[in-house]
Image (cartoon, helix red, strand yellow):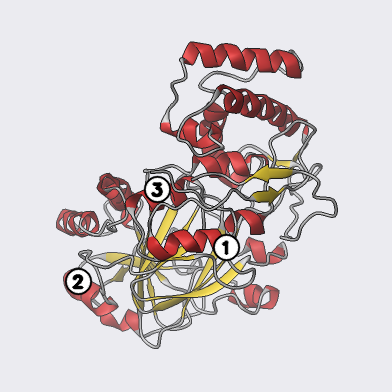
Amino acid sequence: MVVKLLLNTACVLCVAASGTAERPPTGLLRSLPRLCEGCLSEPLEQDYFGGVLGGEPPRLKSLTPEAFRQVAISGRAVIIENASAGTAMQGWTCEQLAKEFPKAKMRREYDWVKNPDDRNLQKMGDKKWAQTVEKGEEHQDRLSQDPKSPPFAPFYWGVRDHEKGDIGSMKVVNRIRQLISASVPRFMDANNADSMFNNAEFWLGANGTGARAHMDSHCISTLSVVLSGERRWRIGPVPRMPPGAGRSRQGEVVYDDGVAYMLGWKPMFEFTVKEGEAVLFPPGWIHETLNTAEGCTVALTTQFDMPRPSRYYRSYYNRLRRVGDLEPCWEDMKTWGSLGGKAPKKGSLQSTELRNLADEIYDRRGGKFTENEVGFFDQDGDGQVSRSEAVEAFTEWVMTERAIKKEKMVNEIQPDMSFQPSEAPKDVTKGSEL
């Protein structure tokens, strides 16, 4: 059964309430100004992601695996209730981690003077860390730029770096692998166990500790579960990249730890996640956390392979394709948009010729597409890529790639941090059937 979501708060919540596949009527999305005439459109963020601006994103409960899959493909940012229910690490505290892994090693974040190489120096079995707070380097600068930024540095146990051999012994690694494999939420594909382990990070600390606003370079979606305690989140999408804003140079990182504050970043959502709840958000979202429980908070943050947020990549292609933090994702994006081939050389084909080329590619493929290509091209939610969908999106994708290459490579891109509708949002895009 197909899950259909109107791309607004009400529809997302109606699916959340039952976790079943329902069919409300099709909605419309307001579009932001395109990068060029004939380029891929980008929906207004409020229409696409729903939620309350400045408050919570959509809150989901009783999710079925299919409902979760469609939310993930679309790249939604949501709160999931009872996410840790029935998992092996449900309710785990800082004390329990210290008892289970006394010889494991982690590090305090933002400790660049004492620990410039980010070595794991803190033994988890020394329980004093769970009650102590310490200001990280440059904390005063960050607080002056944004008074809501977290004042104290959290602890970070980077299980994802287990191959480097400094998070603990093989016994520690094997045990945490076992626990994470048994902690795949009930609404997710169990085959995500390996990717969840290989991307796992534990964020730990007392009241007032937290991670500064930053953007990761992950190409797959993030799930962060509060095992115990409570966290305040401030998050928002990749800032808009209007025409003339430029594009990143090769390998450039734009939104490193705390840099967003200097650029005037304002989060789209600010909310609290309690014990047992999780936050899901797609690649590129700038995010910040603050532990708000009286005691020590434990959060397991990880990424997962299945499914990939391919519809999200199409929906916000021009900004995701131009910010250097997401450079590792560009090849996949281009592969999906080109239907596995390469974009025609600049200016070699006009719109009519591009549509004819797309027709030829569709015939060669025999109407067969990968799961990620379906997510990228399927706009009516029937789980198939029709000829018209393939032709339209392929043509717009080529035009977008050409427009991106015309953008100047700059040392400092000039994003638009707003979420408001443009002055003349003339374009509308049909709401996706998910």
Give the mark toward the camera: 2 or 1: 1
Give the amino acid at mark 3.
Arg
**Image location (x, y in percent) of residue 330:** 56, 35
**What residue is disc 1 on?**
9
Assign the N terminus to one quadrant of the image: top left
Q: Residues within 10 Å of mark 2 (few under 14, many from 20)?
A: some
Looking at the rendered structure, the secondary structure element under dot 2 is loop
Mark sitting earlier along the chain (3/1): 1
Quadrant housing residue 225: bottom left
**Image location (x, y in percent) of residue 118:** 42, 60
Mark sitting earlier along the chain (2/1): 1
Extreme residue toward the left, this view: 171
Image height of 245 relative to 334, above or below:
below
Q: Closest to the observer: 133 or 315?
A: 315
**What residue is disc 2 on?**
102
Looking at the rendered structure, the secondary structure element under dot 3 is helix
Give the mark toward the camera: 3 or 2: 3
Does residue 22 appear in the picture of this structure? Answer: yes
Give the amino acid at mark 2.
Pro
Does residue 279 appear in the picture of this structure? Answer: no
**Image location (x, y in percent) of residue 207:** 44, 84
**Image location (x, y in percent) of residue 283:** 52, 49
Q: Are marks 2 and 1 in contact (CB under 8 Å)?
A: no
Mark sitting earlier along the chain (3/2): 3
Extreme residue toward the bottom, this view: 294
Extreme residue toward the right, this view: 423
